[in-house]
Image: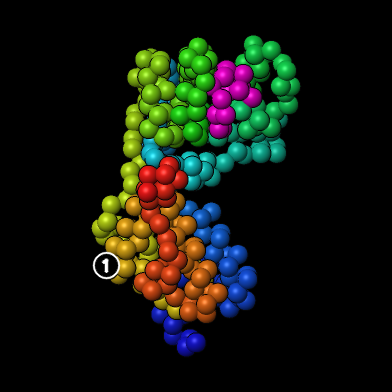
Amino acid sequence: MPETAIELRQLHEMASEALHWDSPARIRRVWEVKTQWIPYTRAKFLIRKAEESLNRPKAPRLPCLLAYADPNSGKTALLKRYGGLHPIDCNQKGDAIHAPAIGIEIRSPDEAALYDSILTAINAPFKIEDRVQKKRNQVLVILEKIGARQLLIDELNTAIAGPLLKQRNFLVALKNLLNELEMTVFATGTPAARIALALDEQLESRFEMEELRRWTYGEEFRKLLESFECRLPLREPSELQAPVFAKKIHELSEGFIGEIAELLMHAAIKAIETKRERIDRKLLEELNWKPPSQRRAEARGLR
């Protein structure tokens, strides 16, 4: 393999350090690509909007943000990235951690579950069987003490997964929590999350709804592919951003960023295993990759 094949490319550190590893080690590194954050314009915009709310002085009815999208569109990765930009400070010289942004996941539309998820996120001791009011009081005291200003809620659409009364109680509990502590929310979810918020008009009116859209084919999509390629530890350039190649990848992924990552990881692994060391159209065809809509149709027996 000529050294120039490596030298002429600008590879991400996670790829460049692995180029001379053996195949099993490089394959393990390929699987790590999906855990890496790849910045793009829409995500940067949403992160800026969330940070604007986080940095505002405490006040009644602070604006909140919901980023909604179909599954596999990068919602959870976006929220994880944002949380990583605002980590919990252990504050070893103080008597409590400092946590301006707290990430939680709603597992059920239940008031107690809301408090459980918050207490778990900040490693506060509590008992599942404790009364809801006790948990609520504990949450109020601790969040005030640690300087919490923003809740990061993944999969807000889960709030409509149960009986209507529970849904309403959950949203009222969330609204009251935000009101008492003058906090804001950055949430993600499927389009159904908008339906969930509609159950409480006061809470809904505080949320700005922003869609995390599927990728359309164009210059920015090709730049995204280039960002993926520079993270793949392949010893030869693939030129994924070439228009003909990029259009094929867009067709197979249907513009879902999670699908793009999966497709390229499987392709890179095949390139390593077959010692071809690059992804090309022939290799993509050998994968027999089916677009998401086709897989769903087949699973439902429609094809």
Q: In this view, does 40 lie to the left or right of 150?
A: left
Position in image of residue 272 (x %, y %): 53, 74
Between residue 113 and residue 281, name the one nearer to us. Answer: 281
Q: Identify whether 196 is placed above or below 81.
A: above
For the point 70% across and 37% down, which residue is it? 93
What type is the residue that disc 1 sits on?
Pro
Q: Identify whether 114 is placed above or below 188.
A: above
Q: Residue 187 lies in what quarter of the image?
A: top left
SS class, disc 1: helix
Q: Is residue 156 left or right of residue 110?
A: left
Position in image of residue 176 (x %, y %): 50, 14
> Which residue carries the number 1 mark?
243
Between residue 29 and residue 41, name the one nearer to us. Answer: 29
Q: Residues within 10 Å of mark 1 (few under 14, many from 20)?
A: some
Position in image of residue 190 (x %, y %): 41, 34
Q: Does the magenta stretch include residue 234?
A: no
Residue closest to the far bottom: 2
For the point 62% across and 76% down, which residue is it? 22
Residue 231 appears in view:
no
Q: Is residue 106 magenta?
A: yes
For the point 29% across and 62% down, which residue is it? 247
Between residue 259 and residue 135, name the one nearer to us. Answer: 259
Residue 135 appears in view:
yes
Position in image of residue 253 (x %, y %): 37, 55
For the point 48% across and 14% down, which residue is it? 164
- What's drawn in magenta, residue-wise? 104-116
